[in-house]
Amino acid sequence: MPGFEPVIGLEVHVELRTRSKMFCGCSADFGAPPNTHVCPVCLGLPGALPVVNRQAVVYAMRAALALHGNIAEETSFDRKNYHYPDLAKGYQISQYQHPISTGGHLDVVRPDGSVLHVRLRRLHMEEDTGKSLHEGVPAGSSGVDFNRAGVPLIEIVMEADVHSPEDARLTLQTLRTVVLYTGVSDVRMEEGSLRCDANVSLRPEGTTAFGTLVEIKNMNSFRSVQRALEYEVTRQSGILGEGGRVARETRHWDERRGITFSSRSKEEADDYRYFPEPDLGALKVERAWVAAVAATMPELPESRRERYVGAGLSAYDAGVLVEDPPLADYFDAVVAAGVAARSACSWLTVELLGRLNGRGEAIGGSKVGPEALAALIRLIEQGTISAKIGKDVLDAMVAEGGDPEAIVRARGLTQISDEGALAQAVRDVLGANATVVADFKSGKDKAFGFLVGQVMKATRGQANPGLVNTILRKELES
Amino acid sequence: MSQGEIWTLSLQALRRLLAAGGTSSAEVCAAFWDRAAELDRHLHAFLDLRPRTAVLADAEAIDRQRAAGSALGPLAGLPVALKDNLSTAGWETTCGSRILRGYRPPYDATVVSRLKAAGMVVLGKTNLDEFAMGSSTEHSAFGPTRNPWDLGRVPGGSSGGSAAAVAAGMAPASLGSDTGGSIRQPAALCGVVGLKPTYGRVSRYGLVAFASSLDQVGPFGREVADVAMMLGAIAGPDPHDATSARVAVPDYSEALVPDLSGLRIGAPRELFGEGVDEDVRASVAAAIDLLGELGASVSECSLPHVGYSLDAYYVIAPAECSSNLARYDGVRFGPRAGHGDYVAQFSATRGEGFGPEVKRRIMLGTYALSAGYYDAYYDRAQRVRTLIRRDFQEAFQRFDALVAPTSPTVAFPLGSRLEDPLAMYAADICSVPANLAGLPALSVPCGLSNGLPVGLQVIGPAFGEMTLLRIGAAFEQSSDFHGRRPPMAVLG
Amino acid sequence: MAISAAEVRHVAALCRLAVPTEQEGALAADLGRILEHVQRLQACDVAGVPPTSHVGELGDTLREDEVRPSLAQDAAVANSAAARAGLFLVPRVVDDEAAQG
């Protein structure tokens, strides 16, 4: 890409997890048989009228606040007019002139620690369309299911502050985490509750004017977003490199073939003929309401990350936890049960998660609760058992659950720290391994490790290793 | 009381007769049904008359309740006709259009539910200009309705069927809808009372939308008291309609005081100007004099921007209609046509299903909203609309009500305005301002001109229906028109 | 005010109305005359006047987030000229479902 800089603006749609739809009382749930969550309103029957779902507005505000947006004093809806089989009314109720929020930003922390500051242009509410299905219908037909029609969406439009496909992916992932934390959506790309389109252009490095925008659609995973944009940047730079002009158009990403192609259904540029929705009055957004919504905001990723780093975790570890809210909640519970942050983090992310992944289990479904893990860590820190024994106990807990103290008692795993008993064990081992003792005394340091191992074996691993070391040295020197 | 006379009675008279045991709901409904069945071949006011057995079954159920001593409201057991753009569950609702042939809504419009809850018995669905777009009912895909006063003339529109049904005694009351005058103008042309309520007074849920910021449902009746009673039954907020007003519904019967002392009435000079027939102007002027005699103080006033009303209306209404009618694509309801991709199918379905006037308005509206034209047309028209609304607000600082002709002319001959859309649109010059301003307006018959009815329009401030009904009732009791019926020699 | 046949075709395409070629001229003439008439609006001084987007005080009617009964599947598709297995049939949509909007 000699001399050209990609300029990428992301447009993200997020499905809000309200119980009912944006403008009617039909269930917004996913997965029901076709056209069983529909009514005159979302089916666009003659005479039907929309009524706004209060919770959708609350969720939109929450998302906007989490992204530092400015909530409008007054917001209203507009009609976006176009024809398509899955668009029941022949228009989508959206927001054009007075969106619920403008401005805002997202700080994207890259793996190398540098930060990309992406500005938001706006966040607005709208309704989703139905879906066209192609399987199980006669050849030459599609079947339209309006269950999804009317489900509340927010559209987040970001300024073109992203300049690489990798940054685009990171931006989307960061956005996803923030929205996930607000609790307003499951934001799963694979389920369609998070969707991303991008506007891409190239410009000569060092310039500020925009090149021709190409809209890219149908990127269905974080990886697709990066791949599609990489392909598109290469495609455009190829054209520009030969002195050609990039056509302003919409292109679809084809995951299978790894290319973008010009959308065949695109005729003349869409003229959406936006005008204010006459069936819905303007909504005054009282500042007291905004404050009430802000007060119910859960802790957001940025604050949580700062809190963890302040508690002593590395930026990397803090990031791992923050990206996975249930994991971070678990971590918080372990710390609350009296364990230091770094210990909690390593036992959780390395020891427990490692074992769960091996069993295909998730942290939520595991038999090891945070208090139990905390209790285990405390047993180790108190010296009741060694770290090695602790791992065996964890194996048992992961398989059968249970309380670590009970397991230690039941199996007689308590670490032996009685110096008298240990001294006896050491003397027994020295007595049984005279040759090795001689080797050590003649300068073979490795023999020491062997002797420690023998003591551990004789005590079935329960000897306090530190004490064994001390006592053995003493005996050998005497 | 013989069956032959029942159809001459108003809702008030019928109610008193039922209460006194002088007749039964079954007898009343049978009388109106029989008259409708007999006359409608001449008038074509109805698109669909329910089977007699079904109508009587509903009426008899009310009679049984009455006999058992149940408390019944004043409208119980009385028949009503509904304009065919009001959704009726399980019953074909065509809006006078081929594109809705066979469409059976799965729900009742709120106003329909409310009338049914009040015990009214629905006789049938009445004819209208297709999708309520028109001023003569000639744009119905199923043939025009004729004016009972002169079968060679239009009944007005778009609620021509509902107006004619009441005028001819086929129903004592009916519901219509009014977007630019579609209740008031046919009321005037057919010599009956018609009311367009304040925007938001009555729920629009289930009224098939034409222009969302202008449409309202309203009643027709023989006399003002009947219209007041109907309004009371349908008015009030509806959780299904976000534009319905959360304003309490008063007891409209309390408005019917025969004295107008203390009322200040204004007559906007611009609504009496050129375009209004001399005879109409004279008839309305005489009516206004009568209001003065009844105690009101009447003076001339001005609504300086009202002359732009028709132009603003014919930008805003088509624009909103172009969007409201985008849903008619043949996918979920209605017939479909065309072969090829969905674009071809939508275009053919809509091209074949819509009549010429509807197509004109969709095209006009699409143009007015399209890129490059939005500011000059739609946006500008909405700003002019603000000026018109302000004119009315200022006038209502000084006056309790305004009066004007309802229609610039009496009923015109069938076919006389079909060649020229602009000539047809001119029928709305006096009625459109109240829709643009969202204000209530009543039309009461005030005289005849060459044997054809003339209507007096009374316009009030927002939620000022009580004042309108008071003025209308007082006028009606004193005027010599009250109680007149179309001669209808052929109709008996 | 003259509207061309090409403009008629463009507008007809936007609102998906099939207009036979032989009707284009008459439609153009009708629209032209109506638009010429409403040009009178240009003479009105609207400086500083906000557009009316809603008449009357609509207040903020919001709905609580409660699920209400939906139509049964057969009722939902009952009015369609072509439905199968609870789906509304349409000519095959060539692009994938993410095509529009």
Image: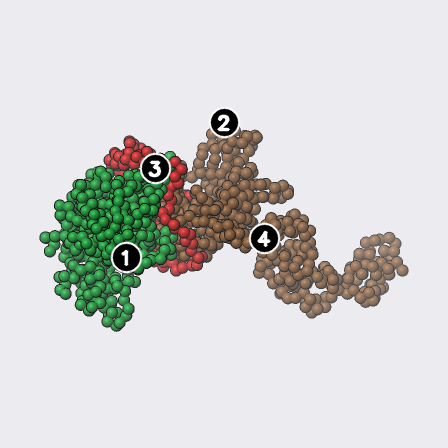
Chain colours: A brown, B green, C red
- The chain letter under disc 4 is A
Amino acid type, callout 3: Tyr
- The chain letter under disc 3 is B
- The residue drawn where x is 88% and y is 58% is A477
Amino acid type, callout 4: Glu
Q: How far is the residue under mark 3 from the one under mark 1?
A: 41 Å
Q: How far is the residue under mark 4 from the one under mark 2?
A: 51 Å
User: Secondary structure beneath disc 4?
Assistant: loop
Mark 1 neighbour density, 10 Å: few (under 14) some (14–19) many (20 or more): many
Q: How far is the residue under mark 3 from the one under mark 4?
A: 49 Å
Mark 2 neighbour density, 10 Å: few (under 14) some (14–19) many (20 or more): few
Q: Which residue is outermost to the left?
A: B489
User: Secondary structure beneath disc 3?
Assistant: helix
Q: Position of residue A212 (x, y in %)?
A: 48, 33
Q: Quadrant of residue B220?
A: bottom left
Amino acid type, callout 1: Ala
Residue designated by label 2: A243
Residue designated by label 1: B255
Point out the frontmost of discs 4 and 2.
4
> Which is nearer the eye, A199 or C82?
A199
Q: How far is the residue under mark 4 from the one under mark 1?
A: 59 Å
Residue B186 is at least partly visible in this image:
no
Amino acid type, callout 2: Gly
Residue designated by label 3: B377
**Tags 2 and 3 in contact by the CB under 8 Å rule?**
no
Q: Is circle 2 on the same chain as circle 1?
A: no
